[in-house]
Image (cartoon, rainbow, N blue to C red):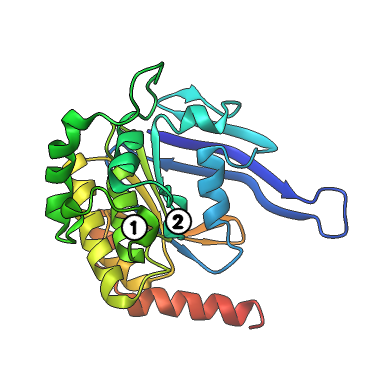
Amino acid sequence: MLELKGISKNYNPGSVNELCLFKDFHLTVQDGEFVSVVGSNGSGKTSMLNIICGSIPVDGGQILINGEDISGQKDFIRQRHIGRVYQDPSKGTCPGMTILENMSIADNKGKAYNLSRGVNKAKVEIYREMLRPLNLGLEDKMGVQVGSLSGGQRQALALLMATMTPIDFLILDEHTAALDPKTAEIIMELTDKVVKEKQVTTIMVTHNLRYAVEYGSRLIMMHEGNVILDKAGEEKRLIDTEQIMGIFNRISVECGN
């Protein structure tokens, strides 16, 4: 279980550009939940993910995983238990390395390399079988540099790599935003399949309201550092895209846009 308790975060403190994004922010994510997070730009969605992953420090509050406070834990330590897929496909993979080399690195996440070989050739066939269900032909391109792949292929590979080792949480940071509509649909279907098969607790930030409604077991909407809508289970199943859009439009009018 993930708990954010009393989180406070200020940007540019003491300057004319000071911004208090979070003030006494609370959120609990139960084990096995697939949470879709929506909200306007500046609502705190990505900052929340960065706080969970340790990319940015908090000014106050606690980040608890299964009751353990990890607020002071370095980001590289947290990454041993967190898989993250970014909006930019290039961030989740090493473009100058082959698919085989990328998968070998992901497979050794959290392990000591010592003086052993970085690539275990005995696992090539295992990696091929992992790639085959993606139906993107990647199993026949093990020696191809990842930088030469399409955005969709790289994002699918990044998603697979993020979940190759046992993790507590999967963080999806607008991971379909840079893709064309057809490829985005493929990646979302793959995401749903991976989350269900791995039964991994997942938080997905997205600007696609339809994806937020169709996928996941819980939907939250953020605005100015607060959760203004939180629906799970049957309540979430009854929500449609038009309702979410209506809330967006109302907020926009209230903010003078």
Q: Is residue 50 above or below residue 138?
A: above
Pinpoint residue 172: horizontal percent, then vertical percent. 39, 52
The CA span between labels 2 and 1 is 7 Å
Residue type at tag 1: Arg
- Residue 90's label in the rendered image is 2
Give the quarter of the figure containing the C terminus. Answer: bottom right
Q: Which residue is located at x 27 percent, y 53 percent?
A: 217
Q: Which residue is located at x 66 percent, y 42 percent?
A: 8
Pinpoint residue 252: horizontal percent, then vertical percent. 57, 79
Q: Earlier in the sequence, mark 2 or mark 1?
A: 2
Give the quarter of the figure containing the N terminus. Answer: top left
* Of 229 and 194, the residue lying toward us: 194
Labels 2 and 1 touching (C-beta < 8 A): yes
* Of 16 and 218, the residue lying toward us: 16
Label 1 sits on a secondary structure element that is helix
Q: Is residue 237 visible?
A: no
Residue denoted by label 1: 154
